[in-house]
Structures are given as C-alpha cells and as structure tokens.
Image (cartoon, rainbow, N blue to C red):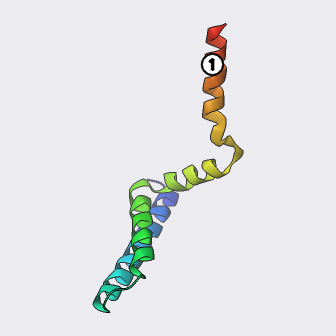
Amino acid sequence: MTPRDRAWRGVGVVAFLFAAGVGLADRLDGGSLLALPAFALALIGLVLIVQGKRVAAAVRVERSRHRTLVAAIRAQRAARTRR
C-alpha cells in the first residue's frame, strides 16, 4: 500500500468518524435532518476506507474527456470485425 493510498484511506476514516460523531450527537439531541448528510458522509468515508486512492482516480476519469474511451475502443473493434 502506497503512502498516497494510506492518505486517502485516512481521509475516509476521519470522514467516517466525524459523521459517526455527528450522528450520535444528533441522536442524543433528539434527532433532526442533520443525520442525513452525516449518513451520506459516513458512506463516502466507508467507500474511501475500502477503495482508497482508486476512488480519486475513478472520479478524475469520470470528469475528464476520457470517460468514453472504453466505449469508443469497443465500438471501433466491433466495426472492424464486421468488415
């Protein structure tokens, strides 16, 4: 595991613990809508804990113009085999 991967997983742990703290504090206070964003943050934290730096790479690819690269390559190969 690279230091960069550990850093992303650490961010996930911090996000999860923060969200768990907010959720517990909200629950002790009687509950409100603050628990919903905390739950979403906890899910993001869990994904970062499990996947690490791959999450950042996947988001970067999805935001770039290369997100359709795989489909374009498959379409070219399919067109070539039909000839």
Image position, residue 73 (x, y; %): 64, 27
Q: Quadrant of residue 13?
A: bottom left
- The residue shown at (66%, 30%) is 72
Image position, residue 54 (x, y; %): 50, 51
Q: Nearer the viewer, residue 19 or 54?
A: 19
- The residue shown at (33%, 86%) is 31
At mark 1, the secondary structure is helix
User: Is residue 12 found left or right of 68 in the rendered image?
Assistant: left
Q: Quadrant of the C terminus?
A: top right
- The residue shown at (35%, 82%) is 21
- The residue shown at (38%, 63%) is 46
| Dot 1 amino acid type | Arg
For this orientation, the residue located farthest to the left is 28
- Number of marks in picture: 1
For this orientation, the residue located farthest to the bottom is 29
For this orientation, the residue located farthest to the top is 83
Q: Nearer the viewer, residue 45 or 82?
A: 82
Per the image, the residue denoted by label 1 is 77
User: Is residue 66 found left or right of 16 in the rendered image?
Assistant: right
User: Is residue 70 found left or right of 8 in the rendered image?
Assistant: right
Image position, residue 1 (x, y; %): 43, 53
